[in-house]
Image (tube, coloured by chain):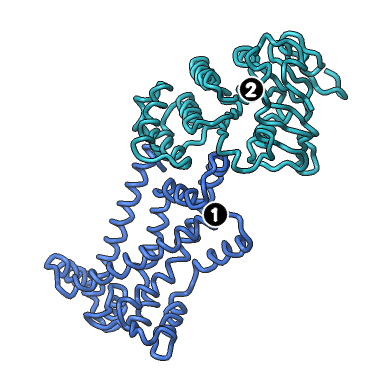
Chain colours: A blue, B cyan
Amino acid sequence: MDSFWSALLEALHLVITLDSDLLEIIGLSMQVTITAVSIACLIGLPIGAAVAAFRFPGRTFLAVLLNAMMGLPPVVVGLLVYLTLSASGPLGPLGLLYTPTAMIIAQTVLVTPIVAALTRQVIEDLNTEYAEQFASMGVRAADRLAALLWDGRYALMTVALAGFGRAIAEVGAVIIVGGNINHVTRVMTTTIALETSKGNLQLALALGFILLVIAFAVNAAVMALRASAVRTAYA
Amino acid sequence: MRDLSPETEGSMSTAPHLAHSPPILTVQDLTFSAQKTVLLNAVSLNIREGSRTLIMGPNGAGKSLLLRLMHGLIKPDAGTITWKGRANASEARRFQSMVFQRPVLLRRSVFANLSFALGVHGLRGKLKADKIRAALHDAGLAHLETRPARVLSGGQQQRLSLVRALATDPEILFLDEPTANLDPASTSAIEQLIMKASARGVTIVLVTHDQGQAKRLGEDLVFLQDGEVAETGPAQTILTAPQSEPVKAWVDGRIYLGSKAGY
C-alpha cells in the first residue's frame, strides 16, 4: 500500500513539475489520437449517414458489417497495418512503419467503423423525422446528407467521443505498428504498459492518472455542450 | 372523372372567378393499396388552378394519402396524376409545397429554417435574406427570427412551417390538417396566411375535419368515404345541401358507419 501512495505522490510530482518526457508522451498521444479521430470522422460520418438515409443494394449488409467491425480486435488491426506498411507490404516503400503516421493509420482503421456505425444509428432516427419533409422540398441527396449531419451535430459529438475514447485508450495496434520507440512513437498507453512491466510504477501511474483526467475532461466538455444544445432545442 | 368545376356541379356562387379555370392537377382512377387493403379506389378529380379545394372525410378515408399521392411523395398502384396536362413528373414538385399536420422543423433558428428551404430552390445571398425577412414580417414572426424553431409554440411552429412552404413561391400548396390541435387564435393566423396565398393565386388543397374551416375557406370540396369519392363540387353547395348519405351524416353530425353497417 505504501508503494502505491509513494507512486501516486511521484506521479503528482511529475505532473506538477511538467516533466519534459511526460509532456512529450502526452503531446504525441493527443496528436495521434486527435488526428486519427478527425480522419475517422471525415470518413465515417458520411458513410454512416449515407447508410442511414439512402436505399441502395447491399445497404443492410453494409450496416451489419459496420456494426461487426466495431469490435475489431486491435492487435489484428495492428498486424494487418504492420503487414501493409512493412518493407515487403504494398505500402512498404513509403517507410511509414514505426512512425506516428503508422499509429494514426492503425487508430483510424479501428475508429472509423465505430464512428460510421454509431452515426448510422443517430442519423437513422433523424432521417425518419425529416425524410418526408425533405422529399416534399425536393432536397438533393448531397444537401440531404449535409443537413442530416449538421442537424445531428450535437448527437454526433457523442459519436466522436466514443471514437476518441477508443483511440486514446488503445495499446495493442499502436505498439505493433509504432514499436514504442522512445521520443518517436511512445504514447501514454504504450508507456504505461512498458513502465509497468519494468516496475517503474510512478511514471505509469502518472500517465494513467492523466489519461483518466483527459478522458473525464473531454467527456465533460462534450456532455456540457450537448446539454446546452438540448436546452435550446438544437439537439 | 369527378370534375369539380362549377359548371358540372351546380352553383357558381362560391367561386365565380374560377368558373373557367383550367385544372392545374388532374387525378384519374387513382388506386392505392397497402397490406392487401384498398385504401384509395379509382379516385378521379380535377384541382382547378387558383382554387381552394378541401378534402374532407372521416378518419381512414384516405385524405392524407390522397394528398401525398398528388404531391408525389407516394407512387400509386394504378391511375395517373397529371400536372398542367403533363404526367406528374418529379420536377412538378418544384412548383409545389406541402405543410404537414405535425410541423417538421430543422434543429436550427427560425431564419435558418427558411434559409434552408430557399437554398434548396437556388436562392443565395442578400436576395434570400431579404425574402426571408419579408416572409417573416408578413407572418408576424419577424421578432422570432433568431429563436430556435423548435422552442416556438405549436401555433408558431405551424405558422413557420406554412411560411416556409410559401416562401418558395409554389403554384400549389398542399396542407394536411394544418390547424389540427391548434387554438382559435393560431387557427385564425394560419387561415389568414392561406387566404393571402390564395389571393396571390396559389392553388390550395387542404385536408380538414373542421366544418367551420370548410365554410370559411372552401371553394371546392372533395368528400372521401372508405377510399372513394362520395361527393364533389362547390363547398358551400355540398355543406348546405349534401346529396350523398355519408356527407349528409357528416354535415348533420351523425355517425356514419358505412353503407353496409348503416348509420
Amino acid type, callout 2: Thr
What subunit carries mark 1? A
Callout 1: SS: helix
Where's residue A71, x and y in %?
50, 69
Would residue B170 be found to the left or right of residue A182 on screen? right
Which residue is nearer to you in this view: B155 or B30? B30
- The foreground one among A44 and A188 is A44
Q: Is residue B72 visible?
A: yes
Q: Chain of mark 2?
A: B
Instruction: Please identify the residue farthest to the left as the structure is shown.
Output: A17
Going 14% across and 68% down the picture, which residue do you hit?
A18
The residue to which callout 2 is attached is B208
Spot occupied by residue B104 in the image (x, y as percentages of width and height): 51, 36
Q: Which corner quadrant of the image does residue B87 belong to? A: top right
The correct choice, above or below, for A42 with respect to B77 in the image is below
What residue is shown at x 65% (from left), y 15% (from top)? Answer: B211
CA distance for labels 2 and 1: 34 Å
Are labels 2 and 1 on one chain? no
Q: Is residue B15 left or right of residue A168?
A: right
Residue B206 seen: no
Amino acid type, residue under disc 1 in the picture:
Ala
The spot of residue B27 in percent (x, y) is 73, 32
The residue carrying pointer 1 sits among few (fewer than 14), some (14 to 19) or many (20 or more) residues within 10 Å by Cα, namely many
Front position in the image: B151 or A211 = B151
Quarter of the figure with the C terminus of chain B: top right
- Residue drawn 50% across and 19% down? B196
* Frontmost residue, B249 versus B232: B232
Residue B258 as seen in the image, left or right of residue A56: right
For disc 1, the marked residue is A52
Res A106 → quadrant? bottom left
Please identify the quarter of the rendering in which residue B3 is found: top right
